[in-house]
Image (spheres, helix red, strand yellow):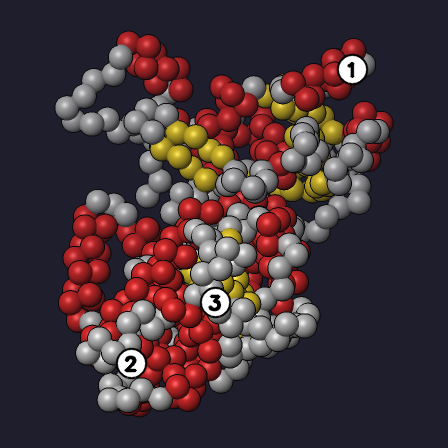
Amino acid sequence: MNYTEITPELRLDCEKESKLDLAPATSRCKESTSYFCRNILGIKSYTWQHLLWKTLDARNTRVACITSRQIGKSTALAIFALKQAVYNLRPAGISNKTHIGIISATDEQSKKVMLEIRRLIQAGDDYVKEDTKGKIPNFLSNQIDSSVEAANNKTTITFENGNTIVCLPPTDRVRGYSFSYVFVDEAAFIEDEGIFFQCIEPTVSHTNGVIVLTTTPNGQQGFLYELFDPEDKNKEHEYIRFWIHYSSIDDKKHIEQIEKKKEFYYDTGREKEFKQEYDALFTSQVSAFFDSSDVDNMIDLNLTRESFWKKDVTHLGIDFGMVNSNTVISIVRKEKDTIKLVWQYIYPPGTDTNLMNDVKTLMQDYSVEKVIVDDCPQGDYIIKEMTKEGFPLTTMKFRTEKVAKYVSFRSMLHKGKIKSYDTDELKKQMKAMQEIQGVVTVKIEKPTGGKDDAVDSFLLACYHYLDQDTSFESYAVLPADKTLEPELMEELELWGNKICEQKM
């Protein structure tokens, strides 16, 4: 899929719809959001916003819009929502009213969107008052229900006609609402995609309502990436898709400002961040630990998930599950200088009660030579039982060994020395793993709300083979004007600089 083209014809249409009218017609405001925006709010829209509004004014019910950062996508949603509520343009339900939900990535962001809507109302009041020489003050404010019973606060506006706009974070609070429109702002940053399918989508099921998704990209992962399908893997798409680059906006000064940012980002080594936030590209996450292309190249379509393996020895890794994670077993084998995933199983929550016997069976079926486990409190009991029964056990201390092992794993992955059969959950988790770089230390973590148990299990199974790969380059970067405290220097020497490897 390519960026959406902003044609000369579309620009002319935007100019036509955005012309000032000496006596703005209510019918035209209802028909055209660009007309409403210019004649009621006193704001001239960007052409890309006009395209989005025109698509929604035509009553399309599923729209997804990927845009560069800071080109007015949240404002576009706020303006359209305000118009729909003021004129009751999509009545639904028993009350025959237009109810609008705006879902933002966090509670703070949802309140910012509501603040933006209130500012637009004030802007509209000021513009109409000036345009009518004071004859019509508070044109939009007067349409808000000021009664004690009406909900009007930081997250809700209730209008005299009974219509409402509600701004919410992506949580279970969304359940129970029924919307004519639901706008999801920064949809790619919703950490729990189950919220979208289980809570947000159902809000329009009884109203035949509209869902609009707007966002900047957030890596090659998550429901938004799959739904938007930038690589056009699917022949048909439920959503009308727009992909808006900052160079398509109408304000040349705005473009120049972003170009200056580009120079700064590139000069400071933040190219990937600029490509994601301003070029609106689905690169791997800015903080992604694994390169997305390395993960894709890991898949060998000639490999299959083996039901047993007797040709040579294997190693088995176990990552013990907790309340919000799964117990996972992975089995790998070494073929020349390449580690290959033979088998992986993710236990559904609460089903790993027979883990000991499962491992015994697997050891027989897959010629397991070594069992590697995470030395963690939740695995303490079973580790003791395995030790008593003489398992060929190795315990990995994640607190002190995780970073060095993950760095070695990534190095071998980049060299094509780690391969797997096609497994969606493993790929998804690997692409979501995040690197948080400090001055002398680095953390490797799953994203908030995400999982890493399949990756950790795979790593554990590879544990002994990773010790053999020490050829990767790594170095520590310290500020030129600073020195390390003695205890930090000892820590740095302990890790042998591996913990501070810088990704290029």
Question: What residue is shown with label 3?
Answer: 159
* Residue 95 image position (x, y, % from top left): 63, 72
Which mark, by number, is residue 334? none
Quadrant of the image occupied by residue 328: top right
Residue drawn 25% across the image and 78% down it: 135
Q: Which quarter shows the N terminus?
A: bottom left
Whole-percent x, y for residue 381 in the image = 74, 16
Disc 2 on helix, strand or loop? Answer: helix
The span from disc 2 to disc 1 (Cα, nearest Å) is 76 Å
If you read the primary sequence from the N terminus, does the residue marked by circle 2 or circle 3 appear first? 2
- How far apart are labels 1 and 3 at the CA level? 66 Å
* Residue identified by numbered label 1: 385
Mark 3 is on which residue type? Answer: Phe
* Whether residue 320 can be seen here: yes
Q: Which residue, given by chain and number where applicable, does mark 2 sit on?
A: 39
Camera-near label (1 vs 3) is 3
Q: Is residue 430 above or below residue 437?
A: below
- Which quarter of the rendering shows the C terminus? top left
Kindly check if marks 2 and 1 are in contact, taking CB atoms under 8 A apart as contact. Answer: no
Q: Where is residue 5 in the image (x, y as percent from the top left)?
A: 35, 79
- Residue drawn at (46%, 28%), measured in percent from left and top? 403
* Of marks 2 and 3, the one in the foreground: 3
* Local secondary structure at mark 1: helix
Q: Few, some or many C-alpha atoms within 10 Å of disc 2 (few <14, some 14-19, many ≥20)? A: many
Q: Is residue 232 left or right of residue 332?
A: left
Q: Please state which of the two labelled residues, at mark 2 or mark 1, is closer to the viewer.
A: 2
- Amino acid type, callout 2: Asn
